[in-house]
Amino acid sequence: MKCDRPPTVLQCYFDSELDALGAAEFERHLEQCSACISALEALESLRSSLNIAQLYEKAAAPFRKEVLARIRPARPVVIFSARAPRRWLAVAAAVLLIAYTGWRVIQVRRGVNYETVLAAEIVDAHLRSLQPGHLTDVVSADQHTVKPWFDGKLDFSPPVRDFTDQGFPLQGGRIDVIHGRSVAALVYARRKHFVNVFIWPTDEKDAALRSGSQQGYQWIDWRKGRTEFCAVSDAAPSALEQLQKLFTE
Amino acid sequence: MLDSQDQVRFETLVLPHFDAAFNLARWLLRSGADAEDVSQEAILRAYRFFNGFHGGDVRAWLLQIVRNTCFTWLEKNRRVKDVTEFDEEFHVPPGPTPESLAIAADSRARLTDALESLPPRYREVIVLRELEGCSYKEIATITSIPIGTVMSRVSRARRQLQLALTDPSHNEATHEV
C-alpha cells in the first residue's frame, strides 16, 4: 500500500519538527495509513539502533590537551643553545666558571619552568573537571569509600581524608593525568567552590609551599613524605592554605 | 591571540563543544587520525575568528567551521568524487521491516560501515540529527542549505542508511574510494 503524502512530512513528524496543528493532523492520518505507520516504525528502529551502537566519538584526552596548549597563552619553555658548548671550548680558562654559572641558571630556570608547567596542567585539569559529569568518578563523602576506590587504579595509595568538620566536605575522587602520569584527584567543596587536590608519588624531598594563580585560579603545591600534593580552586588563597594545613597535620 | 576576556569567553562557550567538533570530523572523514588534524585546524580557526562571533548558537557556529574545513579537506584529499547528489523526488518505499533492521543493526561495526558508506552530505545530516541531536534549523545553519533541503536530505539519508543496513551489497555499491 502506498501513501501519496510527501515523505518529508513523516520525517518532520518523526523529528518533532511539525507544529502542534500539523502533528495532530498527521496523527489523524496515521490512524488510517498503514504505509506511514510501518515507515514510522522503521525510522524508530533505525534511531534506536543508532543509539544502541553508541557511535558518538569523543576526542581523546591527549589530543584535547594538545589543542588546548595551542590556544592558551604561550608558556615559557627552557631553550638550550646547541652552539653554546662549542664557544666554551674556545675560552678554555673560562670553562669551569661558565659551566658552573650555566648549570646554576638552568637549575633556577628549571625550577621556574616546573612551576609554570605544573600550574598550567593543574589549572587545565581543574577546568576539565568542572565540565558536566567530569568532577568525580566515585561520589562519596566517606573517606572509607573513596580510598578503596583507588585500589588497583593507581600504583600508590593516596591519603584520603574527609574534612567536613573543618569546612571542606569531601565530595569524591577520580583519576586524572598530570605530567603524563595517573594521579589521584580528591574533590572537596568549599562553600560554593570546588577544590581539586591532586596527589602523586615523587622522589623529591619534602618541599615548602609553593603557590600562584593562573587564569583566576589559585594553586598551591607541597611535598611531604615522598608525595606531592597540588590543590587548585577559585576559592580564596587562604582557603587552600587552610586545606594544606589539614593535610599536613 | 584573544584578550583575556575573550579567552575566557572562548573557553567557556566554545570548548564545551570540543567533542562535537571531533565527532563530526570523525564521521565526515571516516578516520580518527584525520579527524584530529582537521578538527584541530577548525578549532584554531574558530579561535582566530572568535571576534567575528556575535552571540547566537555557538555549537552551530563551531560545527559550521568544522564541516567546511572537513569538506575542504575531502576535496583536497579524495581521488574519487565523494559527493553524490540525488535530484529525483522519491517516496517512502515499503522499506525494510523493523525486525530485519533490528537484526541487521545490532552490531556497532555494521552500523559504522553502513554510516560510512553514505555520501558525506548524507552522512553529515545523520550525524548532526541522530548523534548530535541538532534541529533542522541548526542543521540548515551548519550546512548552509535551506531548511526545505535539510528535510529532504535527512529523509533520503535515512532511507539510504536503512538500505545499507538491510542489504550489504548496497553497501559495496555506494562505498566511495
Image: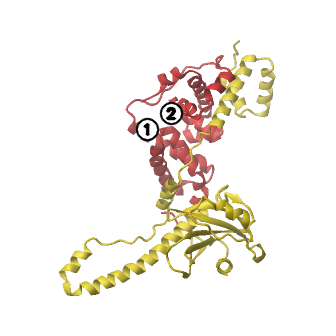
In the foreground, A218 or A60: A60
Reply above or below: B131 against B81.
below
Tell me the SS state at disc 2. Answer: helix
Q: Quadrant of residue A217?
A: bottom right
Reply above or below: B147 against A114.
above
Q: Where residue B92 is drawn, which disc sits there?
A: none
Label 2 crowd (10 A; few <14 / some 14-19 / many >=20): many
Give the residue number, with chain letter if any, for mark 1.
B74
Is the C terminus of chain A in the top left, top right, bottom left or bottom right quadrant?
bottom right
What's the residue at 72%, 20% (across, down)?
A: A38
Q: Which chain is yellow?
A: A
Judged left or right of residue A216, residue A84 is left
- Is residue B6 at all visible to an observer of this figure? no
Question: Residue B44: horizontal and vertical position, in percent?
Answer: 48, 54
Label 1 crowd (10 A; few <14 / some 14-19 / many >=20): some
Is the N terminus of chain A in the top left, top right, bottom left or bottom right quadrant?
top right
Q: Colour of chain B?
A: red
Amino acid type shown at disc 2: Pro
Marks 1 and 2 share the same chain: yes
Amino acid type shown at disc 1: Leu
Reply above or below: B149 against A121.
above
- Is residue B1 at all visible to an observer of this figure? yes
